[in-house]
Image: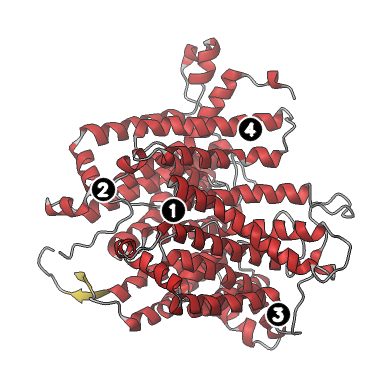
Amino acid sequence: MFILEKRPTPSRFWMAATPILAVILTMIAGGLMFAILGKDPFVAIRTIFWDPLFDPQFASYSRPQLLVKAGPLILIAIGLSLGFRAGIWNIGAEGQYIMGAIFGAAAGLAFYPSENRLIFPLMVAAGAFGGWVWAMIPAILRTRFRTNEILVSLLLVYVAQSLLASMALGALRSPDGGGFPGSRNLSQWATSANPELIVGTGMHWGVVTAFIAVIASYILLQRHILGFQIRLAGEAPRAARFAGVNPNRLVVLCLGVSGALAGLAGLFEVTGPAGQISIDFNSGYGFTAIIVAFLGRLNPIGILLAGLLMALTYIGGELAQFMLGLPSAAIQAFQGMLLFFLLAVDMLGNYRIRLGFGRAA
Amino acid sequence: MDLSAINPAVLIASLMVAAVPIMLAATGELVVEKAGVLNLGVEGMMIMGAVCGLAIAVEAESPVLGFVAAAAGGAALSLIFAFLTQVLLANQVATGLALTLFGLGLSSLIGQGYVGIKPPPTPRLDFGPLTDIPVLGTILFRHDPVVYLSVLIIAAVWALLKFTRAGLILRAVGENHDAAHALGYKVQRIRLAAILFGGAMAGLGGAYISLVRVPQWTDGITAGAGWIALAIVVFASWKPWRILLGAYLFGGITVLQLNLQAAGARIPIEYLSMSPYLITILVLVIMSADRGRAALNAPAALGRNFHASR
């Protein structure tokens, strides 16, 4: 019989080792799943994790994609991690991401086709504002009426998706699109385009912003009183109350920051890789970012690495779909599995496993 | 817009059908939360039920077997949740989310081969001459068995929680797991049973969508019904009969907006289809704004993990 014994303090070794262990376990379980689907598990795992980076045939295309996909994931996950640390669960980042894209694109398209260097910064501001506004709804409902922010933020994703459909078919539809849904192509209009900054790297403004967010969040959590309050509120809510931490302020702050960052991610996506507002330009980054945040142990540096790894599963997944005919849903299930294994091995940090038939506890 | 095209009796009958999936899932989640466990994976378990139910119903050409498989599929997924939260003491919110993300992926993987296939129809229950009573017959006696079953389950859960010893123990575990443990009840085992029941109910609810309401398979077929079910548990302030009320309310809104779409209302379709979510949020706000009431009824140990170390 196994017995879990609580450690006096969390083990630093296991805190760092559990994500790696989880990835290995996921590869094993994922390999099993691929085998059931009739694919060679070793080839499938190699196609997902190795070929995009090192295969001479695909690496030149895939390597830049790594940053393109990791940028929004990291940006959103950094915002989410602040809230998750404080016990504030914003799981509607997908909705905030969509709203950021809509607000930003609308702000830019209002000036079409004029050319002014100030339009792009304005769009960025509008994108952040859009995500922030969408996140303020659960924040204000939580602080004013104690409404559960998990349910509200999630339900607002469905509202945002309906709004997106309405925008793509109505207000933002391209007048020159011949009646097809979707806005003008923002990445082809020089004023609003979010181009690759260094050729061949995939680096665009969204990736730059993501790196800045990583550094800012690291400083905030390590060096600033606000970061201390966030950590305190999550780890010892009672102590936080005695220390004079205002919980409502934290809710507004954490949801606001995560919403604004998700909005920024949406704006950079819609002006760059996606190119236009369409019914389904969002590719579920808002939900995958939840996995990224946990895989990175809610730590900025960890999130940076986790975002890159998760981006790799997206690219490798596409490659495996192309090369092996592996269905894209299999990758989605694979990513979900990763979160399971991560949560399963997480207890190694806080508990010790003992063998034996201890007394009836 | 032609509102006279909407027949009230048919409207009520169809709202009863529309309410079934969320009613089943919410009843299951109510039992889970009464045991002190917050399982946010309802959406994932529902969609697993939807795809398992459809696949088995098509393969076996039997809707009954489909529903059984759906309950098994939902329960199987919830078993992962139970193992992670009860044995490995993982965070319940995060695990619930993982369940939803995983369920959405896995279901679309299983469902690939079943896109566009119609499942065998679920027959109506035959009430003989009762069916022909003018208005009442349409409303009450022209449904499939699951509609009645869902109401019966609510009654059974209500009776179980209110009158039986098992219900008392379940509530004790949810209110104060340390006290229940001290009395010698197996906290983890009781919670495991509750979680499995919740999973099976969510699976049934999902299958009702894919076998009766839609009836076919598309990715993401549950479209947030699981989250609405979670909200309905809050709306019901953890009381079984109010789940019936809540589910009919939301069934009503869903059916009404569909009818308005069909009747050619001036409001764009996208705004009509977001209305059930907006109204769910509104109801949540009203319920939680009432200081004290929601807090008084919520199980005290909700979302807290139990570790018998002391």
The front one of A83 and B168 is: A83
Q: Is residue A67 visible?
A: yes
Per the rendering, the mark at residue B41 is 1
Labelled pair 4, 3 in contact (Cβ < 8 Å): no
Residue B123, image x and y in percent? Answer: 51, 29
- Tag 1, which secondary structure? loop
Q: Which mark is residue B230?
A: none
In this figure, which residue is indicated by the disc labeled 3? Answer: A202
Q: CA distance from mark 4 to mark 3?
A: 44 Å
C-alpha separation, residue under disc 2 versus residue under disc 3: 51 Å
Q: Are marks 1 and 3 in contact (CB under 8 Å)?
A: no
Badge 3: how crowded within 10 Å, few (<14), some, or many (20+)?
Answer: many
Q: Amino acid at mark 1?
A: Gly
Q: Secondary structure at mark 2?
A: helix
Residue identified by numbered label 2: B174
Q: What amino acid is found at the position of numbered circle 2 in the picture?
A: Gly
Residue B261: percent from the left, percent from the top?
A: 69, 33
Q: Which residue is mark 4?
A: B257
Marks 1/3 same chain: no
Question: From mark 1 to mark 3, how far is it between C-alphas?
Answer: 35 Å
Which mark is in front, 4 or 1? 4
Amino acid beneath label 3? Gly
* Camera-nearest residue between A222 and B100: A222
Q: Amino acid at mark 4?
A: Gln
Classify mark 4: residues with Cα within 10 Å, few (<14), some (14-19) or many (20+).
Answer: some
Q: Is residue A355 left or right of residue A39?
A: left
Earlier residue among tags 4 and 2? 2
Residue A37 visible in the displayed image: no
Q: What residue is shown at x 17% (from left), y 50% (from top)?
A: B180
Q: Are marks 2 and 1 in contact (CB under 8 Å)?
A: no
